[in-house]
C-alpha cells in the first residue's frame, strides 16, 4: 500500500542529521523545512510517530532490495554480490536517518527497528550461506548463524560515526571493502577463484 507521507518522510530525513534531543521538535523541523506548523502534526501526530514512520520506511527499503534480488539464483556469490551492490547504491534510503544523539530519546522504537532488521537480514544471509555451502562456494566448517551475525554486525558498525566519520570516509568505500573482506573470508578455494573472476567484470 502506498504511503501518503512518503515524499514528506524522504524530505524530513534530509534535515535530521545534526539535531540534538532538545532541538528535535515539530516546531523546529517545520521552521527549517519551511513548512506550515501543522503539516507535520497532521501527517505524523507526534515526534514519536514520525520516528516510527522513518524507521518503517528504512526497513521497507531494505526488504525491497532482498525481494528484488533473490538469493536462490544459480550462484550464491552472484546473489550476495548483487544484493550488496544494491545496498551500497541505495544506502541513503536504508541508512538509519535518526542521528545517534536522538536514539536514546526514542529507545523503544529504535530497539524494535534494530530487532526487526537483524532478524530479517539474519534469515536472508543464512539462506545464502547454506546455499553457498551446497554449491561448494562457501566453507562448510563455518556456522551459518555466526556468518550472518558477522555480516549484520559489520553493517551496523559502518553506521557508527565513532568508528567511521562520514566526513573522512564515504559509506560506499567502507561498504565495498567490508563486502570484499567478508566474501573472501567465507569462500572455499573454488569460491575465491569464482569471486576473483567475477569482480574483474563487476565494478564494485
Image (cartoon, rainbow, N blue to C red):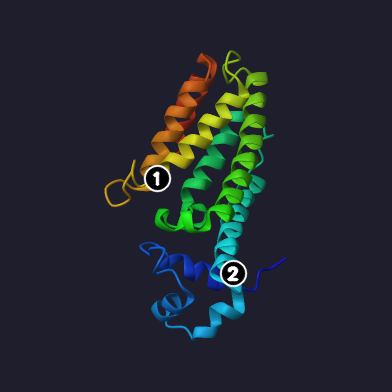
Describe the element under mark 2 as helix, strand or loop: helix
Residue in the picture at 52% in, 23% down: 194
Label 2 neighbour load within 10 Å: few <14, some 14-19, many 20+:
few
In the figure, residue 57 lies in which quadrant?
bottom right
Residue in the picture at 69% in, 68% down: 2
Query: Is residue 97 depicted above or below 156 in this figure?
Result: below
SS for callout 1? loop
Q: Is residue 125 visible?
A: yes
What is the C-alpha distance between the residues marked 2 and 1?
A: 26 Å
The answer to the question of whether label 2 and label 1 lie on touching residues, with beta carbons closer than 8 A, is no
| Farthest residue, direction bottom | 36
Circle 2 is placed at which residue position? Answer: 6
In the depicted structure, whether residue 178 falls above or below residue 57: above
In the image, which is nearer the foreground, mark 2 or mark 1?
1
- Residue 41's quadrant in the figure? bottom right
> Mark 1 highlights which residue?
160
The count of marks equals: 2
Q: Position of residue 44 (x, y in %)?
A: 60, 73
124 in relation to 95, above or below: above
Q: Is residue 51 left or right of residue 164?
A: right
Q: Position of residue 10 (x, y in %)?
A: 51, 67
Percent position of residue 162, x then y: 33, 44
Label 1 Cα crowd, 10 Å radius (few <14 / some 14-19 / many 20+): few
- Locate residue 70, reporting x and y percent: 66, 40
Decide if residue 199 is on the left or right side of residue 52: left
- Quadrant of the drawing holding the C terminus: top left
Among the two numbered marks 2 and 1 on one chain, the one whose residue lies closer to the N terminus: 2
Query: Which residue is at a point 61% across and 29% down the rendered structure image?
Result: 76
Q: Looking at the image, which residue is at 52% across and 40% down?
A: 84
60 with respect to 19 (left or right): right
Amino acid at each position: 500500500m502506498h504511503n501518503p507521507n512518503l515524499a514528506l518522510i524522504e524530505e524530513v530525513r534530509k534535515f535530521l542529521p545534526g539535531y540534538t534531543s532538545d532541538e528535535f521538535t515539530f516546531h523546529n523541523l517545520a521552521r527549517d523545512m519551511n513548512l506550515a506548523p501543522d503539516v507535520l502534526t497532521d501527517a505524523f501526530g507526534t515526534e514519536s510517530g514520525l520516528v516510527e514512520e522513518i524507521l518503517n520506511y528504512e526497513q521497507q527499503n531494505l526488504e525491497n532490495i532482498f525481494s528484488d534480488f533473490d538469493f536462490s539464483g544459480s550462484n550464491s556469490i552472484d546473489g550476495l554480490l548483487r544484493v550488496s551492490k544494491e545496498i551500497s547504491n541505495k544506502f541513503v534510503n536504508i541508512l538509519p536517518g535518526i542521528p545517534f544523539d536522538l536514539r536514546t530519546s526514542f529507545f523503544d522504537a529504535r530497539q524494535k527497528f534494530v530487532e526487526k532488521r537483524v532478524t530479517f537480514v539474519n534469515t536472508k544471509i543464512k539462506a545464502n550461506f547454506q546455499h553457498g555451502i551446497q554449491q561448494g562456494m562457501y566453507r562448510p566448517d563455518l556456522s551459518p548463524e555466526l556468518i550472518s551475525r558477522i555480516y549484520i554486525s559489520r553493517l551496523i558498525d559502518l553506521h557508527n560515526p565513532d568508528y567511521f566519520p562520514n566526513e573522512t570516509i564515504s559509506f560506499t568505500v567502507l561498504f565495498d571493502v567490508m563486502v570484499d573482506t567478508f566474501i573472501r573470508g567465507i569462500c572455499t578455494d573454488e569460491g575465491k577463484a569464482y569471486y576473483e573472476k567475477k569482480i574483474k567484470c563487476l565494478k564494485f
